[in-house]
Image: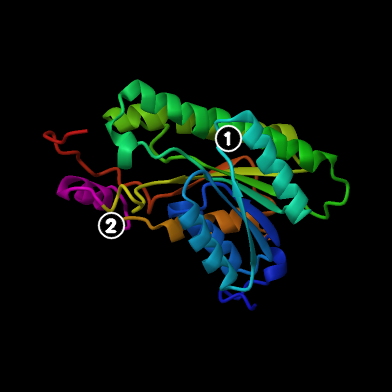
């Protein structure tokens, strides 16, 4: 299928794995990969099978083949299974996107205590992601037929290193800062065989962003120089770029997708976290 952006599909990943692709940013990444000419995409999910199937259907509407795989990234055996399944079914993998993360802001988990939320984030977003990445890298380094360096992309957070008040900042900040630090260190270990980068989204209108009150809506818009919320598609386009040969000289970087940080924004003193 021709690439609507005008970029040759041969320069983009042919086979890709997207973790946490049943909704939100992960779903957008999988669809964007397919839209730009990817041939086969593994759609990973943990519990949302219906969402994963919907993602697969949209991926296949662009002519790509979707492969579903269920795995809990907090469990070692599941991580082993995911990596083995991915390389067995896709054979070669050009891009691996570590997007999966625990939602502790909406649904049943929103009512958990701070410590339990943090433990879940550490188990999946940090330890699970690191362990999974090491398995993927081991597979790639054993391969001898790679014509170009495959890419692994991590999802961070733009405010992780700057700081944000409230429990959300205290949970996501340390975890996502560690993820981005790991990405930079991994890049040093595996270059030039493998490229490693991270994308750090800002205020993105995902499930949580769709339910916020007026204060958070104003804050998200005003803290961006572009004066709007970001979309999952904004993040997806950045991931596709970092996964493609168009960014073949880019590794060990963190690309912020936040519309530009507005340093003139003044936070309301009566805001609640």
> How many angstroms separate mark 2 from mark 1 (CA)?
32 Å
Counting residues from the N terminus, which is met first, the one under dot 2 or under dot 1?
1
Query: Along the line of sight, which residue is nearer the eye, 251 or 137?
Result: 137
In the rendered image, which quarter is residue 174 located in?
A: top left
- The residue carrying pointer 2 sits among few (fewer than 14), some (14 to 19) or many (20 or more) residues within 10 Å by Cα, namely some
- The residue carrying pointer 1 sits among few (fewer than 14), some (14 to 19) or many (20 or more) residues within 10 Å by Cα, namely many
Magenta part of the protein: which range? 211-226
Which quadrant: the C terminus? top left
In the rendered image, which quarter is residue 114 located in?
A: top left
- For image coordinates 56% across by 73% down, the residue present is 61
Residue 112 drawn at (x, y percent): 31, 28
- For image coordinates 51% across by 56% down, the residue present is 52
Q: Residue 129 shows which numbered tag?
A: 1
Q: Residue furthest left?
A: 270
Q: Residue furthest top?
A: 115
Q: Residue 248 shows which numbered tag?
A: none
- For image coordinates 58% across by 35% down, the residue present is 129
Q: Would residue 71 be visible to someone looking at this image?
A: yes
Mark 2 vs mark 1: give the one in front: 1
- For image coordinates 61% across by 75% down, the residue present is 3
Q: Where does label 2 land, which residue? A: 227
Query: Along the line of sight, which residue is nearer the eye, 38 or 203?
Result: 38
Residue 38 drawn at (x, y percent): 66, 65
Mark 2, secondary structure of its residue:
loop
Which quadrant: the N terminus? bottom right
Question: Relative to residue 149, is residue 41 drawn left or right?
Answer: left
Q: Is residue 222 magenta-colored?
A: yes
How many numbered marks does the figure carry?
2
């Amino acid at each position: 299928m021709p690439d609507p952006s005008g970029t040759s599909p041969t320069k983009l990943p042919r086979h890709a794995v997207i973790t946490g692709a049943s909704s939100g940013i992960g779903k957008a990444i999988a669809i964007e990969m397919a839209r730009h000419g990817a041939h086969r995409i593994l759609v990973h999910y943990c519990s949302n099978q219906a969402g994963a199937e919907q993602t697969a259907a949209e991926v296949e509407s662009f002519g790509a083949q979707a492969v579903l795989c269920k795995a809990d990234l907090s469990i070692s055996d599941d991580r082993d299974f995911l990596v083995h399944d991915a390389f067995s079914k896709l054979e070669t993998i050009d891009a691996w996107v570590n997007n999966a993360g625990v939602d502790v802001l909406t649904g049943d988990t929103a009512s958990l205590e701070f410590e339990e939320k943090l433990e879940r984030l550490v188990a999946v977003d940090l330890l699970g992601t690191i362990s999974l990445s090491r398995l993927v890298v081991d597979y790639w380094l054993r391969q001898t037929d790679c014509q170009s360096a495959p890419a692994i992309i991590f999802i961070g957070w733009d405010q992780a290193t700057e700081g944000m008040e409230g429990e959300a900042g205290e949970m996501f900040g340390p975890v996502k800062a560690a993820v981005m630090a790991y990405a930079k260190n991994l890049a040093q270990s595996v270059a030039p065989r493998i490229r490693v980068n991270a994308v750090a989204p800002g205020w993105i209108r995902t499930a949580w962003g769709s339910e916020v009150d007026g204060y958070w809506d104003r804050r998200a818009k005003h803290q961006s120089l572009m004066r709007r919320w970001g979309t999952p598609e904004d993040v997806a386009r950045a991931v596709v770029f970092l996964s493609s040969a168009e960014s073949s000289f880019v590794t060990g970087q963190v690309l912020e997708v936040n519309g530009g940080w507005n340093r003139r924004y003044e936070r309301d003193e009566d805001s609640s976290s």
